[in-house]
C-alpha cells in the first residue's frame, strides 16, 4: 500500500493502529470493516488455521491481532485477548444476550497453531459465551472463529457482585 500524499510505501509500526509513510510521515488509519476490525493489508506471515489463507495484521478496539479476511477468524495473544474482552465489555450498551448452548462436536476439531504448527488445545472457554476456544499454550495464542469474541463480550457477566448478597 502506498501513501496517498507522496506515493511512498507505507509501513506498519508495531503496536499502532495506523500505517506510516517514512517519507512524508502521513498516518493512514484503515476504515474498520463490518466486524469493526481495521485490516492493514500487510501479511502477518502466518496462515489461517481454519481456511489456510494468509492472516493479515489488523487491530480491533486498539488491540493488535491477526485476522483472516476469508473466514473472519482472529488470532490474538493471551494478554491482548483478556484486555480486549475487558475493553469491549466496559463499552457494551444494552442488555446481555443469552448465551447459546455450546455444540460438543466443536471439541472434536483439530486446529494447528499458525506459529509453531502444533495442535492447539481445543476446550470450552472458561468465561461467559458458551464457546469453544483454541489456544496454544506454548505460543500464548488464542484462535477465535468469527463472532466468538462477540459471543464472549455480549454474554451475561458471570462475576458475582458481593454487595448483591447483603440487604442494605
Image: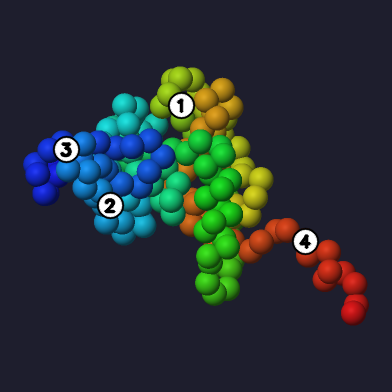
| Image quarter hosting the N terminus | top left
Q: From mark 4 to mark 3, how far is it between C-alphas?
A: 53 Å
Mark 1 Cα shell of 10 Å, populated few (<14), some (14-19), many (≥20): many
Please name whichever residue, 101 or 62, is drawn nearer the observer in this view of the structure.
Answer: 62
Q: From mark 4 to mark 2, how far is it between C-alphas?
A: 39 Å
Count of numbered circles on the image: 4
Please name whichever residue, 28 or 161, is drawn nearer the observer in this view of the structure.
Answer: 28
**Residue 29 circle label:** 2
Mark 4 Cα shell of 10 Å, populated few (<14), some (14-19), many (≥20): few
Instruction: State which tag comes first along the sequence, 2 or 1.
Output: 2
Q: From mark 1 to mark 3, how far is it between C-alphas?
A: 37 Å
* Image-based side of 122 in relation to 44, left or right: right
Q: From mark 1 to mark 4, how far is it between C-alphas?
A: 34 Å
**Residue 23 circle label:** 3
Instruction: State which tag comes first along the sequence, 2 or 3.
Output: 3
Q: Please tell me whether mark 1 sits on a helix, a strand or a loop.
A: loop
Q: List the residue tagged with mark 4.
A: 160
Question: From the viewer's perspective, is the residue at label 4 or at label 3 nearer?
Answer: 3
Question: From the viewer's perspective, is the residue at label 4 or at label 2 nearer?
Answer: 2
Q: Position of residue 161 (x, y in %)?
A: 78, 65
Q: Please tell me whether mark 3 sits on a helix, a strand or a loop.
A: loop
Please name whichever residue, 90 or 141, is drawn nearer the observer in this view of the structure.
Answer: 90
Instruction: State which tag comes first along the sequence, 1 or 4.
Output: 1
Circles 4 and 3, Cβ within 8 Å, touching? The answer is no
Question: From the viewer's perspective, is the residue at label 1 or at label 4 nearer?
Answer: 4
* Residue furthest bottom in the image: 168
| Image quarter hosting the C terminus | bottom right
Q: List the residue tagged with mark 1.
A: 113
Q: Is residue 1 visible?
A: no
Amino acid at each position: 500500500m502506498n501513501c496517498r500524499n507522496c506515493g511512498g510505501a507505507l509501513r506498519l509500526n508495531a503496536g499502532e493502529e495506523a500505517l506510516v509513510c517514512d517519507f512524508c510521515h502521513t498516518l493512514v488509519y484503515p476504515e474498520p470493516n463490518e466486524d469493526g476490525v481495521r485490516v492493514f493489508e500487510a501479511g502477518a506471515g502466518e496462515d489461517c488455521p481454519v481456511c489456510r489463507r494468509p492472516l493479515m495484521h489488523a487491530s480491533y478496539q486498539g488491540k493488535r491481532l491477526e485476522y483472516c479476511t476469508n473466514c473472519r477468524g482472529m488470532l490474538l495473544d493471551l494478554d491482548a485477548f483478556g484486555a480486549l474482552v475487558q475493553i469491549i465489555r466496559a463499552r457494551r450498551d444494552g442488555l446481555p444476550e443469552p448465551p447459546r448452548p455450546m455444540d460438543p462436536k466443536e471439541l472434536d476439531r483439530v486446529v494447528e497453531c499458525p506459529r509453531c504448527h502444533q495442535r492447539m488445545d481445543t476446550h470450552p472457554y472458561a468465561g461467559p459465551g458458551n464457546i469453544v476456544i483454541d489456544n496454544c499454550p506454548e505460543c500464548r495464542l488464542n484462535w477465535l472463529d468469527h463472532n466468538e469474541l462477540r459471543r464472549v463480550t455480549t454474554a451475561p457477566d458471570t462475576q458475582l457482585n458481593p454487595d448483591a448478597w447483603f440487604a442494605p
